Image: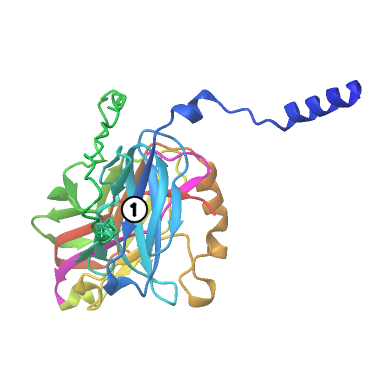
Amino acid sequence: MKNLNYVLLGFSLLSCKTVSRDEFNTKMTDVSVKIPDDLKSYDAKFSFSRIDSKADAKVVRGQDIQVKLPSGSYTVNLALSNKNGTEEFEACDTVKRYEFRETKVDAIIDICRKSDRALVAKTLTTAIVVPPAPPPGPVDPEKPVEPPIIVVPPIIVDPPIVLPPVVDEPALFETDDKCFGMPATFTREGTEIVIKPSGEIKDHIFDSANYPTCTITFNIPKAKGKGFAPSKYSVKFATDESTLAYKHYFRPIVKDEADISAFPCRLAIMNVATQSEKYFECSFYDTTPEKFGTVKESDKLNYEKSCNAESTKIRMEIALIGKTATKISTLQIPEVRVSIPYTEKCL
């Protein structure tokens, strides 16, 4: 019998789970997000990335969600997709800092239409439902009225919140103050960088050594196992008929400091359609309905290289390309828009 007790004691010890002290000390926050009724027909996906941690983003799907997160500073990404799987709406500002430090908080997110970045709605606050008080019972006139019992609740003092030390962070993006050889301003508007060149390109003859370019460097660190989510760009221009006839085009190339592709971008051919400020996608993913959300076969090798690489910045260079000896008579480019890239976990 004594031997059996030893066996049971040994089994009990083996069955115990070792719990670290941090698991007890980590403060958690219940984060609630409520989608407006007008957008309830869309599939919703949320991504919570903690700023002061290298942990993977927490991805949650659903309309009205409540997720338990370690208290801290976060960025939140939101995507609303239609029944075909196409994303139609997204968070307006994916780099906005959210402080989730109370026991329960509502994440209020601005929702923008992907096609034109217009603000369409905000997520809602979650109301706390208080049950109604029960109706009073009959009063017995012969029963003495007892004084109410006053209970003094204990005073609970929350421990002080220790914020991470403030450090000098690098600028989100860097430029050389020129775009396609023209002086330009670079400003941030929500989730986009807006570039406004001034002046015009006049009587330019193309050869392979003098393509006009517009370059922007994003200081966005990326860990191994993560890639860059799809981005997009647009170019607004005005030119003459003789220049338009050559079908010159804009070719973006996006690479990290090790010359590894961050994602491929579609070419924007200069024609009447592109003058309407149309957005062009930058993504490794297939957009056809039958293969939506999968990596294109032709881009799988570069996608794997990007996922296996660790980087601190990516450089986007948009080149204006034309056949050798063709000409630009006059060309104005009043505006270029580039979505700010962000990282996501690789497939």
Q: Which residues are magenta?
A: 221-240
Q: Quadrant of residue 129?
A: bottom left
Pinpoint residue 95: horizontal percent, then vertical percent: 28, 46
Pinpoint residue 177: horizontal percent, then vertical percent: 16, 43
Residue 21 appears left or right of 77: right
Residue lying furthest front: 142
- Residue drawn 29% across the image and 43% down it: 217
* Total numbered circles: 1
Residue lying furthest left: 199
Q: Nearer the viewer, residue 4 or 204?
A: 4
The verdict on residue 140 being magenta is no
The verdict on residue 237 being magenta is yes
* Residue 323 visible from this viewpoint: no
Q: Quadrant of residue 101?
A: top left
Q: Residue at label 1?
A: 32
Residue 293 appears left or right of 126: right
Q: Secondary structure at mark 1?
A: strand
Q: Nearer the viewer, residue 333 or 323?
A: 333
Q: In terms of secondary structure, what is the magenta stretch mainly?
A: strand
Look at the picture and state if 183 lies above or below 35.
above
- Residue drawn 44% across the image and 72% down it: 85
* Residue 226 visible from this viewpoint: yes
Q: Counting other residues with Cα less than 10 Å from the Cα at mark 1, is it few (<14), some (14-19), or many (20 or more)?
A: some
Name the kind of residue labelled 1 in the image: Ser
Pinpoint residue 190: horizontal percent, then vertical percent: 20, 53
Look at the picture and state if 338 lies above or below 23.
below
The quadrant of the image that shows the N terminus is: top right
The quadrant of the image that shows the C terminus is: bottom right
